Image (tube, grey):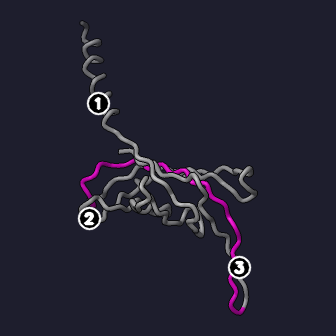
Amino acid sequence: MTIRTLKYALLLPALLLTAAAQTTTTYTLPVGTNCISINGCWYPVLAADGSQFGELAIANVSQIDYDDGLQPVAQYCTPGTITLTQTATPQFGPTSYHFVFQCAATPEQTSQDAPMLLHAEIQAHSYVARYCVRSCIYQTRWIVDGGSTLAITQ
């Protein structure tokens, strides 16, 4: 066996162990979550049994807050890793969009949990709300539609 073959023989099991150690859990973002904008909202995050796992904040400081079984903790998105894209989905209505949010999050000394990759797929539509007291103001708001999810990879 040559040195090069030996190097790859030793490297391959390490790569496979690293890949096998990561798991992805998918959560639901509930229908009807109402926000002033997609990028400026706290989204409830529901587990498969319908219980609340935590909350996802997509904002200037994006983060996931949850309970690790011992205490409430948070993981914060690392600057430079945050992406938020949108695509019109007119087949669902004239104000419907599909948003994709992703970031690499770290516990920032709030827990012993491993860093996370957060990947949210949000289907939402906008509407204009009218608020009147003495005069009226109009505000665009967003409502989360069905099929919206958050995948967390650790």
Q: Which label's residue is closer to the chain start, 3 or 2?
A: 2
- Badge 1 amino acid: Leu
Q: Which residue is tagged 3?
A: 130
Q: Which label's residue is closer to the chain start, 2 or 1?
A: 1
Asked whether disc 3 touches disc 1, contact meaning CB atoms under 8 Å apart, the reply is: no
* Cα distance in 3D space between marks 3 and 2: 40 Å
Q: Which residue is tagged 1?
A: 17
When asked about the image quadrant of residue 76, the answer is bottom left
Q: Which residue is tagged 2?
A: 71
Farthest residue to the top: give it. Answer: 1
- Magenta range: 110-134
Which element carries disc 1, helix, strand or loop? helix
- Badge 3 amino acid: Arg
* Cα distance in 3D space between marks 3 and 1: 55 Å
Could you tell me which quadrant the N terminus lies in? Answer: top left
User: In this view of the protein, can residue 81 be seen by the observer?
Assistant: no
Residue appearing at x 51%, y 52% in the figure = 149
**Could you tell me residue 87's position as x and y percent?**
66, 49
**Could you tell me residue 151's position as x and y percent?**
45, 48
Question: Is disc 2 surrounded by few (<14), some (14 to 19) or many (20+) residues within 10 Å?
Answer: few
Q: Which label's residue is closer to the chain start, 3 or 1?
A: 1
* Cα distance in 3D space between marks 2 and 1: 30 Å
Residue appearing at x 55%, y 53% in the figure = 148
Question: Is disc 1 surrounded by few (<14), some (14 to 19) or many (20+) residues within 10 Å?
Answer: few
Q: What secondary structure predominates along the stretch shown in magenta?
A: strand
Residue appearing at x 67%, y 64% in the figure = 126
Which element carries disc 3, helix, strand or loop? strand
Does residue 71 appear left or right of residue 25 in this picture? left
| Disc ID at residue 121 | none
User: In this view of the protein, can residue 24 be seen by the observer?
Assistant: yes
**Could you tell me residue 103's position as x and y percent?**
45, 50
Could you tell me which quadrant the C terminus lies in? Answer: top left
